[in-house]
Amino acid sequence: MKRRTALIFYILSVYVFVQFIWWGFHLIELTREVSMESEQVSKRVVMIIGEGAVFLLLLVIGIWQIHRAIGKELKLSERQNNFLLSVTHELKTPLAANKLYLQTIGKRDLTKEQQNDLLKKALEENTRLERMIDNILNASRLENNVLKLEKESINLSELMTQVAQRFNAFLEKETVQFEGEKDLIVIGDKFMLETIFNNLVENAIKYAGTEETVLLYTRKNGTTIECGVKDQGTGISKEHREDIFKKFFRVGNEEIRTQKGSGLGLFIVSQLVLMHGGKVECLDNQPKGTHFKITLKHDQ
């Protein structure tokens, strides 16, 4: 429906533009005929032509602005459609998996070890579902401006170490590592900062895999603190580095995508960093992968 509305708008815009030029042509022709008889009439016609030119300029500017707005709406609509496809799949997968695990435990005579293994898998699926729901709720709160900063003094180095330890415990391997200066203090919201790094690490693991090291780091740079996450995945092309922070944006077609996700994680990261008065950048990691760098103010 939106594409049809856009098409109708463009057709009408072209019609108005062509008609305006056609009227202008006839007015110029009429001016030539009238100018022979009356100099005063000729001046009035010139004035009308001048006003018409200003109107035409405003019309072109207006059409261009509406064209841009329609383009943005179409892209947002496409991202929303991708989001719905993704979320539908993301919600069904853990629910179906948990149902299968519980049915297996209930119907089969399993050893204690096998039961514990299935229960562990069910909890993992539940955790993944919980994180996705949290992201949806946080995105909604950000859109409605109801998510507020609860400021306190936070040891950022300690917080990032805890994030790394939680992921390693969940993965049962030392995939996530932390390095950097100790006791770097920032003023901010602990829940929001944890959400930022949880989303970045989860993203890194998703695209780089658990066999590659994910690095969390902090360092002081003058009056600011630089921190972030580096992975060794396939990286993100430069053409998509600005779009990845937009709500619902995911690279590629949702119908043929193999990677899980909702397209909300990096949007939430960018908004929460902005609320802390900082900035987030997507850079190349060396020798490969992606580097998300965050700059925050340092609490002296």
Image (spheres, helix red, strand yellow):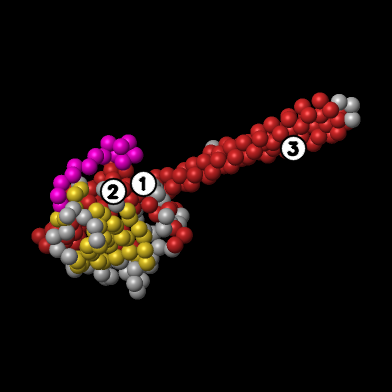
Mark 1 residue element: helix
Question: Residue tagged by mark 2?
Answer: 277
Query: Between 170 and 69, which is closer to the camera in this rendering?
Result: 69
Q: Is residue 90 visible?
A: no
Q: Which quadrant holds residue 29?
A: top right
**First in sequence: mark 2 vs mark 3:** 3
* Amino acid found under the numbered disc labelled 2: Gly
* Amino acid found under the numbered disc labelled 1: Thr
**Dot in front, 3 or 1:** 3
Query: Between 86 and 283, which is closer to the camera in this rendering?
Result: 283
How far, Cα to Cα, is label 2 from label 1?
34 Å
Question: Residue tagged by mark 3?
Answer: 21
| Left/right of residue 201 with respect to residue 52 in the rendered view | left
Residue 117: % across, % down: 16, 60
- Magenta segment range? 140-154
Q: Which quadrant holds residue 14?
A: top right
Residue 160: % across, % down: 19, 59
Is the residue under label 1 in contact with that under label 3 (CB below 8 Å)? no
